Image: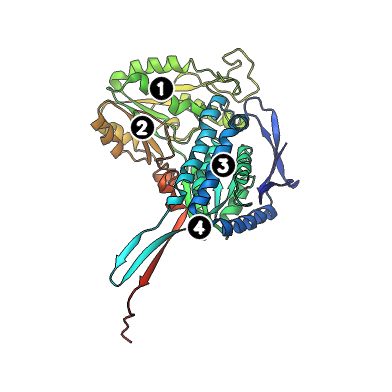
Amino acid sequence: MAYTQFIDGALTTGSAKESWVNYNPANNNVLGEVCQATEEEIDAAICSAEKAFRVWKNKTGAERGRVLLKTAEILRLRLEKIASLETQDVGKPISESLAVDVSSAADALEYFGGIAATIHGDFFDLKNAFGYTRPEPLGICAGIGAWNYPIQIAAWKAAPALACGNSMIFKPSEFTPATALELAKAFIEAGAPAGLFNVVQGDGRVGAMLTNHPQIAKVSLTGSVSTGKKIFAGAANQLKKVTLELGGKSPLIIFEDADIHNAVSAAMLANFYTQGEVCSNGTRVFVQRKIFDSFLKQLKERTEKIRLGDPTDPDTQMGAVISKAHLEKVIRFIDSGKSAGATLLTGGFRPEKDFKGRDITAGNFLTPAIFTDCEDSMEICKEEIFGPVLSILTFDTEEEVIERANNTDYGLAAGVFTNDIKRGHRVIHELQAGTCWINNYNITPVELPFGGYKQSGLGRENSFAAIQHYTQLKSVYVELGNVESPY
């Protein structure tokens, strides 16, 4: 099949000028051909989005909300179909696609559909006058997605943008073109005007065209720090609004009084869910020295029982990484860790069979890796790997671990495990990260803002906090008396 553009309410025939093959990470079979959007198609998407914006911005919040809620309903009705597409595109287990990817996309649409009618300004009682503010939509917003959670990311960007009265042009990752098209179809079926949510396929050149286009009012990116810097620089030329959700090298701190079973569960979720391809992952696991041996024993035993294999099998717990090139990149990091003196305790190799004995050598599979004897200065402890590689570091004191945890250019996420609730809050308040957990990890309900500090990004996604990133505030002063003038 051909993955084309979705513009003005319909799939296009696709351009023959440039395309590439989309592969299934689990077996590297061909899924279809991705058609790179042309400048003409970008212009058509802009024109269509502008027309839709003129209609959409004048609808009431309740009217907009009903469309978002209906879209969520459609996604839930098509849960199995869309989850299957997601699993084929990303390589993650079908159990994850069913439980998280599509469901969290629907959650976002329901949340912002529910609050669309409550978006409002403020009233100010003044002397012989009054004033009020209006949160007004920005116009056409561009969303640029990553390949690890394609439909979730598309919905996380579209839902608040549309709830506020904007239109959106969304570019999925070139590795995962499928499910954003399903979201676009659902919007149309739910009653959205044609052009309200357009999808354009392509690589970074398409992202640059959107960022640089004078009619795009805002860009929201989920991606790497290097890509985020390019988007930020491009948007600065026209002072566009930006939201950047970028990478991380997040700390997960486990104190000696923690529930070890729960802490091990969190460490595994923070490193091996979605094959470790999660931006907020807690890949630096700091364990207080007193419980190091017992923690490590449980972690190793449970990690080696992870059921790695065919992502379409409901019993599979871990699938394949996104591409051959990315697999090689992760393996290079593993080699770097070994060369630097870290001990590869388990995993980190390409398996020939899955947990049911099936041949998986054609896919991009890698067994989950655990490194011990790590030092903060090692590459595996400093750089984002974006794969199933967990590095364990020991610590002695609270003050020490806070300083070490903050010694990074990133600041996306952090976690603390302790039964001392005072210490839990105290340490979290000292950690330089925008998204934090106490006694859990990587739980991201739509009700809470999501985003990072430092080079992990700008702005926030989800929650009511996202509204300010998709609106501009107008102040209005209304005189009730005469105009006083010195002239």
Q: Which residue is drawn at 54% across and 36% down?
A: 149
Q: Where is residue 35 in the image (x, y as percent from the top left)?
A: 70, 43
- What colouring style does the render use? rainbow
Which circle, 3 or 2, is nearer the viewer? 3
Distance from disc 3 to disc 1, alpha carbons, whole Å, reads 34 Å
Q: Which of marks 1 and 2 is nearer the N terminus?
A: 1
Q: Do the residues labelled 3 and 2 touch (CB within 8 Å)?
A: no
Question: Would you name the residue on which mark 3 appears?
Answer: 71
Q: Which amino acid does label 1 sit on?
A: Ser
Residue sticking out furthest to the top: 357
Question: Would you name the residue on which mark 4 appears?
Answer: 138
The quarter of the image holding the N terminus is: top right
Label 3: how many residues lie within 10 Å, few (<14), some (14-19) or many (20+)? many
Residue 354 seen: yes
Judge from the rendering whether residue 38 lies leftward or rightward of residue 163; answer left or right: right
Q: What residue type is labelled 2?
A: Gly
Question: Would you name the residue on which mark 1 appears?
Answer: 265
The quarter of the image holding the C terminus is: bottom left
Q: Where is residue 320 in the image (x, y as percent from the top left)?
A: 58, 26
| Disc marking residue 415 | 2
Which circle, 4 or 3, is nearer the viewer? 3
Judge from the rendering whether residue 339 lies leftward or rightward of residue 45; answer left or right: left
Label 1: how many residues lie within 10 Å, few (<14), some (14-19) or many (20+)? some
Residue sticking out furthest to the right: 16
Between residues 331 and 300, which one lies in front from this camera angle? 300
| Quadrant of residue 44 within the rendered picture | bottom right
Q: What residue type is labelled 3?
A: Thr
